[in-house]
Image (spheres, coloured by chain):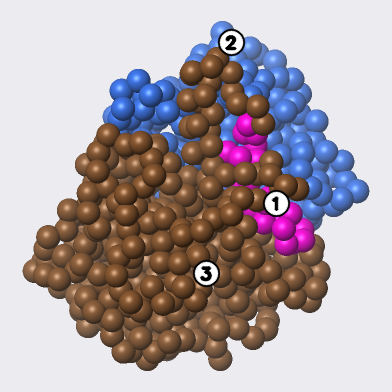
């Protein structure tokens, strides 16, 4: 597949609400969820932290790269998606018999993509994927393949919310949203040779995202930010590790 | 009107299917022909009445794969069993690394987590053996299928609510055309759970009797379990070809369709454009047709605007229930039956037709030679996909 250029990046975590804040170690008092500027409050009713983290990362990547949110293609990815909502709905069913319709309609895995499309009036291609520890590589693969045929721009948005109790792994990592604005063709910062390589290394995301597939974005964003050419590992677990080469002109 | 296709048609080498109509393709085809609704009360504790589509026989997983145990995993295993020989031949022909696994699901193993949470509420701990990753994860169905099949290529799940099982065809076709893989096992699977049954009830769209899509007397939808698997490949012989898939977004509402059906129409036009076909080339449409007042009328308007009023349309939801993330795949299998059999099933319960539905809904089984069939799938989040299938070359 042809290379794609990286036009912009976005990141949200509870204590570092932007990529530059994360990069520079500029921590702030953690907030439960981002404010999602530019999205009508009525649209955010009943949405999850994962959806809000995705919307914030999408907005930031589009702003950084100059993407038009009303027309850009979007590929959303998450391992467990709306897991907090799933647990909350189960509790409502147990306690009240019937779940909240507002929460229910936002319980689908493509809730971030749906809310984003409505918020920005975007009728173009969007999809929502789920995968395990190789989520980042597989979402990039979907984006590469789409850009190969359609050209133009696409934003890959990954989000994972803190797993709620009593589920296994609750509290293992905070919520996170990360996004990359990609454009078909070459540029100053490119991603090339996306591949699975059984002999390749695994990504080792920094604390507290070591066990989170979306945490693998941090290493990629770091390499892109530093314009450091070389191979970047994309998988924290599962199967043959996915790798991509960053090619950056300094 | 045939123009140059934007994409190359790809052969569908083989497929398997299970639904309330039957546990395999033969039974399902017989059920489609018979045209009697198998929907019945689900074996679940619910505070309201409804009927659902239940797959007749679903065996427990073999001990070596018991960590994946869930209703949706049993459906995957059932579907794999019928397709095992063809999958084995595909893996042998192209090599396991060159075969992707791309499945669609919306519910996944949520029913297992519901039971685990209920257990935790009663006893203070999750049940022993509960495995969030392998029993709940939307991607677990693909992991199970990869473990069964030996396919080692890219593996992920498309989860865009009720369009999931149709969008997998687009994703897989792109990977094949881009040269990433040579073949893909694609499909959709879904099962019943408390959250979806009670959630759709909360939205006041669940019917207590078998649904009646496009009828003046329709009162809502039913849910169902089931799915279908297909082998899509770069080359080879098979019962059908994937001609094109159109994907669009409504950008309107999380759970209600665009009032003018703009997104649905865009998906249908997108499929035609990919395939290089005109409206007159489509012989039959398997509609999304859920049976809710709003959805059916809007879809009918969209079909009329893109394909005209004369193309024979059916909804098969009264025969299977709405299988959510599996619906696109299940109804793609019905499209392949229509291409092969020379008849289309009746749109059960459609009579008397809603006078505001100005398309040709076939309430009875109809003899029809089809060369091109469209299957529509529309979901929450305004996610739309229309897939076009043609007979073998």
Residue at 52%, 69% (x, y): give it.
Answer: B24
Point out the image quarter for the C terminus of chain B.
Answer: bottom right
Identify the residue under disc 2.
A28
Residue at 56%, 8% (x, y): give it.
Answer: A29
Give percent across and percent down for residue B161.
43, 49
- According to the colouring, which chain is brown? B
**Relative vertical location of residue B327 with respect to residue A209 in this rendering, above or below:** below
Identify the residue under disc 3.
B24
Residue B150 lies in the magenta-colored region:
yes
Residue at 91%, 48% (x, y): give it.
Answer: A199
Q: Residue B218 sits in which quadrant?
A: bottom left
Q: Name the disc covering residue B62, or none.
A: 1
Q: Are marks 3 and 1 in contact (CB under 8 Å)?
A: no
In this orientation, does residue B272 appear?
no
Q: Residue B169 sits in which quadrant?
A: bottom right
| Secondary structure at numbered mark 3 | loop
Do marks 2 and 3 both belong to one polypeptide chain? no
Residues in magenta, as a range: B130-154
**Relative vertical location of residue B340 with respect to residue B352 in this rendering, above or below:** below
Do marks 1 and 2 both belong to one polypeptide chain? no
Marks 3 and 1, how far apart in space? 19 Å
| Secondary structure at numbered mark 1 | loop
């Amino acid at each position: 597949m042809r290379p794609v250029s990286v036009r912009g990046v976005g990141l949200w975590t509870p204590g570092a609400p932007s990529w530059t804040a994360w990069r520079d170690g500029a921590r702030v008092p953690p907030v439960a969820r981002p404010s999602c500027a530019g999205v009508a409050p009525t649209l955010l009713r009943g949405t999850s932290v994962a959806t809000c983290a995705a919307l914030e990362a999408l907005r930031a990547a589009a702003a950084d790269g100059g993407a038009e949110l009303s027309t850009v293609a979007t590929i959303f990815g998450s391992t467990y998606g709306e897991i907090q909502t799933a647990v909350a709905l189960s509790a409502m069913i147990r306690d009240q018999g019937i779940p909240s319709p507002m929460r229910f309609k936002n319980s689908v895995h493509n809730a971030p993509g749906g809310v984003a499309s409505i918020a920005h009036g975007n009728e173009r291609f969007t999809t929502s994927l789920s995968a395990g520890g190789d989520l980042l590589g597989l979402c990039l693969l979907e984006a590469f393949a789409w850009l190969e045929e359609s050209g133009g721009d696409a934003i890959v948005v990954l989000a994972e919310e803190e797993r709620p109790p009593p589920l296994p792994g609750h509290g293992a990592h905070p919520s996170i949203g990360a996004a990359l604005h990609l454009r078909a063709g070459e540029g100053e910062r490119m991603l090339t040779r996306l591949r699975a390589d059984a002999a390749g290394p695994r990504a080792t995301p920094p604390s507290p995202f070591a066990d989170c597939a979306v945490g693998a974005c941090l290493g990629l964003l770091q390499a892109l930010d530093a314009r450091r050419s070389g191979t970047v590992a994309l998988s924290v677990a599962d199967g043959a590790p996915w790798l991509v080469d960053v090619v950056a002109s300094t | 009107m045939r123009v140059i296709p934007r994409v190359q048609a790809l052969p569908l080498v083989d497929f398997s299917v299970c639904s309330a109509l039957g546990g395999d393709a033969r039974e399902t085809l017989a059920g489609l022909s018979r045209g009697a609704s198998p929907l019945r009360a689900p074996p679940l504790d619910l505070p309201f009445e409804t009927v659902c589509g239940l797959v007749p026989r679903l065996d427990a997983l073999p001990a070596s794969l018991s960590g994946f145990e869930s209703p949706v995993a049993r459906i995957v295993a059932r579907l794999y069993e019928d397709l095992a020989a063809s999958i084995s031949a595909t893996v042998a022909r192209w090599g396991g690394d060159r075969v992707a696994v791309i499945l669609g699901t919306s519910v996944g193993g949520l029913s297992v987590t519901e039971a685990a949470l209920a257990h935790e509420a009663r006893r203070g701990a999750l049940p022993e053996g509960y495995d969030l990753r392998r029993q709940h994860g939307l991607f677990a169905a693909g992991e199970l299928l990869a473990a069964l099949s030996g396919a080692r290529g890219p593996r992920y799940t498309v989860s865009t609510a009720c369009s999931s099982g149709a969008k997998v065809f687009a994703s897989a076709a792109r990977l094949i055309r881009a040269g990433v893989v040579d073949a893909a096992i694609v499909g959709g699977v879904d099962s019943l759970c408390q959250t979806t049954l009670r959630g759709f009830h909360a939205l006041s769209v669940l019917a207590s009797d078998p649904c009646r899509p496009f009828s003046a007397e329709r009162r809502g939808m039913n849910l169902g379990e089931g799915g279908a698997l297909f082998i899509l490949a770069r080359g080879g012989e098979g019962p059908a070809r994937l001609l094109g898939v159109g994907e669009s977004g409504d950008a309107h509402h999380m759970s209600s369709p665009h009032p003018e059906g703009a997104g649905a129409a865009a998906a249908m036009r997108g499929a035609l454009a990919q395939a290089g076909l005109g409206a007159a080339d489509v012989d039959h449409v398997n509609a999304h047709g859920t049976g809710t007042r709003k959805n059916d009328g809007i879809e009918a308007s969209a079909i009329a605007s893109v394909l005209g009023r004369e193309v024979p349309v059916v909804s098969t939801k009264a025969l299977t229930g709405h299988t959510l993330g599996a619906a696109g795949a299940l109804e793609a299998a019905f499209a392949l039956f229509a291409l092969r059999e020379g008849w289309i099933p009746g749109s059960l319960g459609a009579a008397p037709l809603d006078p505001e539905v100005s398309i040709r809904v076939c309430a009875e089984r109809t003899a029809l030679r089809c060369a091109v069939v469209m299957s529509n799938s529309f979901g929450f989040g305004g996610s739309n996909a229309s897939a076009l299938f043609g007979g073998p070359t």
